[in-house]
Image (spheres, rainbow, N blue to C red):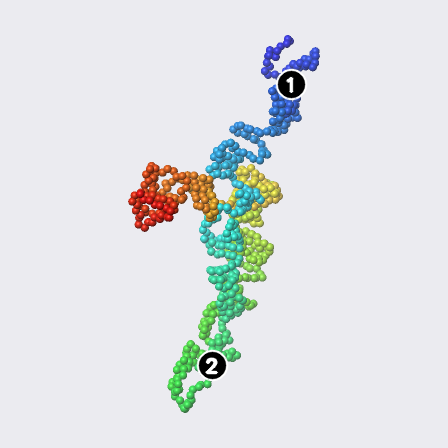
């Protein structure tokens, strides 16, 4: 064909890969000069090129274009690669990336950001403009957010914040919260709201601090307990003066301890028990043969020797006018001896009818003229000694036997105090079948078994953890009122026996047991069960956690994630709790090791209602605090345009507003700076008024004491009257002129 220009050719709008293009090879001649290339080869045979010399470039910028090679595509500008796509689909952008759109979606498994700071809501303005900005996790169970809330001036989280073990929360560099407990001290609140609890029968622990003043943490100790119902305060020891009833060991001087001491070591006044002095410092012995049949009491029958001793004690050494009575214990007799009578025997004494001087015999006047009766000798009386003293029916002075009054006129029964009976013999009439009640025993030791019948119960010892026996022996058991569990001592440590329904926060270390719910049926990890009952470790006592977050669960050394909900459908991994059961998202491996820790009950922390206010009297510019509302939970704020000097008492503000009705006692020295233009007619209590800058008016009566300033002159118009009792003082160098 003839030579034609390119513009004369018909456009090929849809070339096929097999279509060919003519090529003129300028390096050849003749027929070799005319060559061709297919459309497919033209597109596939581009050279690789490089970032500085792209295969496809622009004539105006030869180092800007597209290059390839080694399964990599590179977009370059200015001789530098700006975008690289590898054969693995890895896209690399070495420069900044700006996405201008409404929504940017990144569908990846992991997003790694090497930048140290991520900005959100950039360029949107102030705090109010970025209200609600934050991070949101999309969930079918409800979005999980961490957002900025301008109305509260704070970051808020829709979910729990869980500190990992060993991690802490700090405020201004000071630890205030760990993974297990609150630490540190409050910088503002110095008091808490205390509610009354005067009747609950429980053991509580009074709070105390290590120091008398300053910032202190509240502490407790099991050695100091209090029961609000009984009002009983218990401590290992007390120091100082005590009043009221005290149980336990009381030491100190007798004058410093008043009231009843339940464990006193000595009585203030010794008492006689069955004739034996007793002050509490040592044991005494009572005759075991006097125990009556089955009642647990002691009866006393005085022997002849005892009666003789009592009667002999009454008369031995006593002397009635000229008569001496002596008790002979050997034969149980009373010897009466009449002394020498020193009467005047002048005259015929043998036939005397009267004594010259009457005498008293046993208190009865006798002069010999007639017979007299002596009470207790030839007539009945309080000292009647008729009969055989060995068989006397009454004692002259009643005696106490074990606290029971006894005068011999009738039999008495005496209760034997526990622990006072010694010896090895009981009265023969005491038989097993008749012992229906023996009172209270301090201790009982038996070499055989104890058989108890009936449908009642045994009331065992009960007390707090701090009240455990100081020197326990193996086999002891008791009820622990602190843990509400029965416990026993195995020779080395106390352990729980059971007997209580588990409640939230009562246990620390938990174990798994078989659950009757779906997915349960096994008390161990068997590879198929995924639901288990939670019990206190070492017991069968079920525990009901408050929520899943309150537990720390580890399986084969891997901590498990707590989730909200009550079943497998409520979570993607980890576990949930339902009542007393823990439910895993999948069955733990067979034989897996684990531990479960119950962190306790949730603690509600209220807002501080009071603050500690210190006296600040130094020359310091302070900023008064205020709130944005009159009531409610509000944050405290201050402003630089409202100041107070604590030394001078100066309150400063940019503007003052108000009626001024309460502005009193303002001295002229306190007015500084320029005053605004005012109507003088509204001023009262001032020395003069100015009208229009031309007329100055003053009152005609001076009603207040006034002292002129030294070396100043004063002027008043009119006839001036000084009110009664008022003084005007004009110092030396000053003048006061009345026109």
- For the view shown, which residue lies furthest in the bottom direction? 348
Q: Residues within 10 Å of mark 1 (few under 14, many from 20)?
A: few
Q: Which residue is mark 1?
A: 42
Q: Residue at x 46, y 40 (%)?
A: 640
Disc nearest the viewer among 2 and 1: 1
Q: Which mark is residue 166?
A: none
Q: Which residue is mark 2?
A: 324
Q: Nearer the viewer, residue 604 or 431?
A: 604
Q: Residues within 10 Å of mark 2 (few under 14, many from 20)?
A: some
Quarter of the image holding residue 407? bottom left
- For the view shown, which residue lies furthest in the top direction? 2
Mark 2 touching mark 1, by CB under 8 A?
no
Q: Nearer the viewer, residue 495 or 528?
A: 495
The spot of residue 128 in percent (x, y) is: 47, 35
The spot of residue 79 in percent (x, y) is: 62, 25
Q: Is residue 434 visible?
A: no
The spot of residue 422 in percent (x, y) is: 55, 67
Q: Is residue 623 left or right of residue 530?
A: left
Question: Label 2's element?
Answer: strand
Q: Residue at x 48, y 37 (%)?
A: 149
The spot of residue 257 in percent (x, y) is: 49, 62
- For the view shown, which residue lies furthest in the front direction? 733
Q: Is residue 21 left or right of residue 425?
A: right
Q: Using the image, determine if residue 544 lies above or below residue 332.
A: above
Quarter of the image holding residue 678? top left
Quarter of the image for the C terminus: give it: top left
């Amino acid at each position: 064909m003839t030579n034609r220009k390119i513009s004369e050719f018909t456009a090929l709008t849809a070339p096929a890969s097999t279509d060919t293009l003519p090529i003129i090879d300028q390096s050849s001649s003749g027929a070799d000069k005319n060559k061709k290339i297919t459309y497919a080869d033209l597109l596939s045979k581009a050279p690789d090129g490089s970032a500085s010399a792209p295969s496809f470039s622009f004539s105006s910028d030869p180092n800007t274009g597209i290059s390839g090679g080694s399964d990599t595509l590179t977009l370059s500008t200015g001789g530098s690669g700006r975008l690289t796509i590898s054969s693995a689909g890895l896209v690399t952008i070495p420069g900044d990336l700006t996405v201008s759109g409404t929504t940017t979606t990144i569908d990846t498994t992991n997003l790694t950001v090497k930048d140290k700071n991520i900005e959100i809501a950039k360029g949107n303005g102030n705090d109010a403009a970025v209200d609600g900005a934050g991070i949101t996790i999309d969930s079918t169970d409800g979005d999980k957010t961490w957002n900025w809330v301008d109305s509260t001036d704070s970051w808020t989280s829709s979910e729990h914040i869980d500190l990992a073990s060993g991690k802490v929360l700090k405020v201004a560099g000071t630890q205030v919260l760990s993974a297990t407990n609150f630490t540190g001290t409050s910088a503002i609140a110095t008091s808490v709201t205390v509610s009354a609890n005067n009747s609950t029968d429980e053991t509580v622990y009074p709070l105390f601090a290590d120091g008398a003043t300053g910032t202190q943490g509240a502490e407790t100790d099991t050695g100091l307990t209090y029961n609000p119902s009984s009002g009983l305060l218990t401590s290992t020891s007390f120091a100082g003066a005590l009043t009221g009833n005290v149980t336990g060991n009381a030491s100190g001087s007798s004058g410093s301890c008043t009231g009843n001491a339940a464990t006193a070591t000595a009585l203030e006044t010794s008492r006689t028990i069955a004739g034996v002095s007793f002050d509490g410092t040592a044991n005494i012995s009572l005759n075991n043969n006097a125990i009556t049949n089955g009642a647990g009491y002691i009866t006393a029958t005085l022997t002849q020797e005892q009666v003789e001793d009592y009667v002999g004690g009454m008369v031995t050494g006593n002397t009635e006018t000229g008569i001496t009575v002596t008790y002979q214990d050997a034969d149980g007799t009373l010897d009466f001896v009449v002394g020498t009578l020193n009467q005047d025997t002048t005259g015929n004494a043998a036939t005397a009818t009267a004594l010259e001087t009457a005498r008293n015999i046993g208190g009865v006047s006798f002069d010999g003229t007639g017979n007299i009766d002596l009470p207790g000798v030839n007539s009945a009386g309080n000292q009647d000694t008729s009969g055989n003293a060995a068989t006397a029916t009454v004692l002259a002075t009643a005696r106490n036997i074990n606290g029971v009054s006894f005068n011999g006129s009738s039999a008495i029964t005496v209760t034997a105090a526990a622990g006072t009976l010694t010896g090895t013999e009981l009265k023969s009439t005491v038989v097993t079948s008749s012992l229906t009640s023996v009172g209270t025993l301090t201790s009982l030791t038996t070499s055989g078994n104890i058989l108890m019948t009936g449908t009642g119960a045994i009331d065992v010892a009960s007390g707090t953890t701090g009240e455990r026996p100081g020197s326990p022996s193996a086999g002891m058991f008791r009820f622990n009122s602190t843990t509400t569990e029965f416990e026993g001592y195995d020779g080395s440590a106390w352990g729980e026996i059971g007997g209580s329904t588990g409640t939230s926060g009562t246990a620390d270390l938990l174990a798994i047991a078989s659950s009757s719910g779906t997915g349960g049926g096994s008390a161990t990890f068997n590879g198929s069960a995924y639901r288990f009952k939670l019990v206190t470790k070492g017991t069968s006592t079920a525990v009901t956690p408050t929520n899943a977050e309150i537990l720390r669960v580890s399986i084969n050394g891997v901590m498990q994630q707590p989730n909200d909900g009550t079943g497998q459908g409520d979570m993607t991994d980890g576990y949930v709790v339902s009542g007393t059961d823990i439910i895993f998202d999948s069955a733990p491996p067979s034989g897996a090791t684990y531990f479960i820790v119950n962190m306790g009950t949730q603690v509600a922390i209220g807002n501080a209602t009071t603050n500690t206010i210190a006296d600040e009297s130094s020359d310091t510019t302070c900023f008064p605090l205020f709130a944005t509302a009159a009531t409610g939970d509000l944050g405290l704020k201050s402003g630089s345009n409202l100041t107070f000097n604590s030394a001078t008492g100066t309150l400063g503000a940019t503007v003052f507003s108000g009626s001024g009705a309460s502005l009193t006692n303002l001295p002229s020295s306190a007015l500084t700076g320029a005053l605004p233009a005012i109507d003088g007619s509204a001023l009262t209590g001032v020395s003069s008024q100015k009208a229009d800058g031309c007329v100055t008016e003053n009152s005609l009566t001076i009603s207040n004491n006034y002292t002129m300033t030294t070396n100043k002159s004063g002027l008043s118009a009119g006839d001036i009257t000084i009110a009664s009792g008022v003084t005007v003082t004009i110092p030396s160098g000053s003048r006061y002129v009345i026109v």
